[in-house]
Image: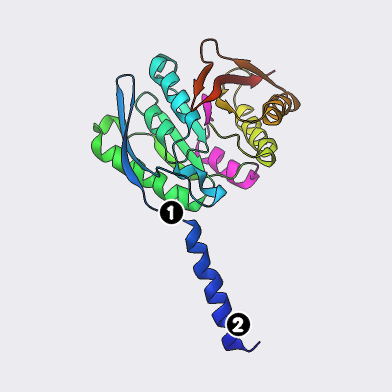
Amino acid sequence: MNREDKGEEEEEIVCLESFFINNDYQLTTFTFGSQVLQLFCLQSASTDFDLTGQLVWPGAMLMNDYISKNAELLQGSSIVELGSGVGITGILCSRFCSEVVLTDHNDEVLKILKKNIDLHTSMENPSCKAGLGVEKLEWGNSDQINQILQKYTGGFDLILGADICFQQSSIPPLFDTVEQFLRIREKGQCKFILAYVSRAKMMDTMVIREAARHGMLINEIPGTCSVVGNLQGVIFEITLE
């Protein structure tokens, strides 16, 4: 193959990558109790599994319903959210918390996340703008975790995750990441709140097992078990033993 043919082949491969990215975002209104949010998101899944963050998933609805009913638990808190996606949970939290850091690992998802934060801050009272940050974070990436902890030296009161347990391979690095955030604070001063949607028994078992392997206690928050999107959902509170 000569250089010209090779160049044409490489160019064709690069073009194919664009087929996986769907940017057909629609401004959508969500209501949680007295709280109304507007944000851009996809209405159906992308063709790339890695871009699931472009959607609002059932577990995020479960988490946000819980937040809207228990806003006093968040008052004045500092929060880091894992797998923020389009930002529906983190943005709702910003109405109650002193500081919110939204994270995701995918660059395309980070773009829409930042766009939604810009939309939110432009529509809200200026007092709601403070403390909304975005950071790139791939679970288990110690360099990225350390960069966040160096920037937010006091750590966080709460770690949030809404419907973030999809792939078995992601669960160990997820709990590795959670453990590092939990250990920055004194025991019991930081909690991991996980809105979990059960899609496979094997995943259910793996989440429980990984929590135990990392020296964590996992407890169902009473009254949070419900059906979301025809699936069983629950909110867990996870702390260090």
Q: Residue 22 — which label?
A: 1
Foreground residue among 231 and 15: 231
Q: Is residue 91 left or right of residue 62?
A: left
- Residue that label 2 marks: 6
Magenta stretch contains residue 34: no
Query: Which corner quadrant holds the C terminus?
Result: top right
Which element carries disc 1, helix, strand or loop? loop
**Disc 1 and disc 2: Cα gap in Å?**
28 Å
Neighbor class of circle 2 (other Cα within 10 Å; few <14, some 14-19, many 20+) is few
Which element carries disc 2, helix, strand or loop? helix
The kind of residue on which mark 2 rests is Lys
Magenta-colored span: 140-162
The kind of residue on which mark 1 rests is Asn
Q: Is residue 20 left or right of residue 96?
A: right
Foreground residue among 197 and 188: 197
- Percent coordinates x, y for residue 42 in the rendering: 40, 44
Foreground residue among 217 and 205: 205
Return the residue found at the far top: 222
- Percent coordinates x, y for residue 19 in the rendering: 48, 61
- Percent coordinates x, y for residue 28 in the rendering: 32, 38
Q: Is residue 16 left or right of residue 201?
A: left
